[in-house]
Image: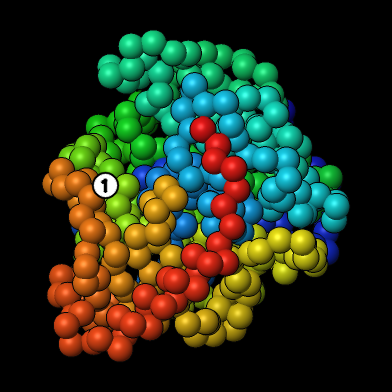
Amino acid sequence: MLAGAALSAPAPKQTSRPNIVIILADDLGYGDLGCYGHPTIRTPNLDRMAQEGARFTQFYSAAPVCTPSRVALMTGRLPGRSGLTRVLGPQATGGLSPTEITIAEALKPLGYSTACVGKWHLGHRPEYLPTRHGFDSYFGIPYSNDMSPKTNPTRQDGPLTPLIRGDKVIEEEPDQNFLTQRYTEEATKFIRSSAQAGKPFFLYMPHTFPHVPLHASPKFRGKSPRGLYGDVVEEVDWSVGEVLKTLREAGADRNTLVVFSSDNGPWLIKKEDGGSAGLLREGKASTWEGGMREPFLARWPGRIPANVVTQAFGTLMDLFPTCVKISGAKMPGDREYDGADLSPVLFENSAGREPLHFYYNAEDLRAVRKGPWKLHLATNEPATGGGLSKHEPPLLYNLTVDPSEKYDVAAANPAVIRDLVGLIGQHKKTMKFGELQR
């Protein structure tokens, strides 16, 4: 091709509906990005994304581990409603029910092209894969990268990790050093083809990393001051940069909402191979703040004001109603939703709604937050080997002044305790669990 050939390519057709890109890291901690205060991990693309849009300081996942967190993102509902409260592995027989409605399924009737690129983790059997849940295409691995005997020495048997295109296995145990690169190539190809076709598009890009085992391509390996973990995060940052660059080159930049977050907190028991929750307490597999409060960035030039740092409350469950709102779709009226539309926060820099969040670990409701107050009925400390501790009376923290959850103020606030215990009781009466999927 001649050097100037790309300049003569036909301009992409314009679509009136906005494009949506959701990028999700795996096990990335609240403190792992430069724009969230990490001193040695270099994330220039995510930092620039924060400067060009909004950065949230009080944004949450719906679970401290991957499968339930991801189903909540996809459906806008607490994980228990779908029965996906546990991490699914290669031996799992269950997955995402056909009765659930994903973001992709909500957007498809409006003419959206839809693609999932990366780690799905909502069931590996063909009937549970993205292509059965509203996605036109899928490329990625169906569960975590440490779930085969080749990648995890504690697993003596089981299948090799499959790389899937559509619903077909195209490789077994792909070279993980190149997964981020391959995901990026697939994602940018989808953006270009959708923009050229003039169709609105929805890209869901759940990365495999920085979940352990850590892998980075030769271009990034050994380059970060933070070591291998830093190499991996910096490659994810590069991938975000490639997505944003492709949006600009495709003429879709100013008609696309891009958000970035993580499924749960850092896997602290992995020590240097795990990340950082910054000033927050604990990490993955716990309902302390470090397990479920996540980085969240949102960018849409011309719609989201630049360089906003917001204390507004939000959760991954909010992405479903937000996508429905901005696309012009309608919320299904036949089910309970737990997320709320973030449009006023994103576009008007509104203070948003009062924080209200239920912290589940599997089917166990461990804590609740209302406003500044967080009450713990039970806690665990996986980073230090601490098992489940039940608290009677409950623990109480004021997250506005004590986000690190260091100072229990229960004794001085009996009325707050009564209010929050009553709120938990009301929630339990109305919460309907779906059939447990394993």
Q: Visible in this render: residue 106?
A: yes
Horizontal arrangement in the rendering, residue 95 relative to residue 417 (left or right): right
Q: Which residue occupies 52% across, 13% down?
A: 172
Q: Within the image, what quadrant is residue 289 found in? A: bottom left
Q: How is the image coloured?
A: rainbow
Q: Secondary structure at mark 1?
A: loop
- Residue 161, horizontal then vertical, whole percent: 48, 19
> Could you say which is closer to the camera, residue 309 or residue 26?
26
Q: Is residue 27 left or right of residue 110?
A: left
> Where is the N terminus found, in terms of image quarters?
top right
Residue at position x 40%, y 38% from top?
Answer: 209
Who's the residue at 30% across and 72% down the image?
375
Query: Looking at the picture, how far across and down is residue 211, in whole percent?
Result: 36, 37
Residue 139 % position (x, y): 62, 30
What residue type is disc 1 on? Answer: Gly
**Residue at horizontal 19%, vertical 46%?**
387
Whole-percent x, y for residue 78 in the image: 54, 57
Q: 380 above or below 229?
A: below
Seen in the picture, residue 334 relative to 250 is either above or below; the reply is below
Count the marks: 1
**Does residue 403 lie above or below 69 as drawn?**
below
Name the residue carrying label 1: 275
Which residue of the protein is positioned furthest toward the top in this rendering? 157
Residue 21 visible within the image: no
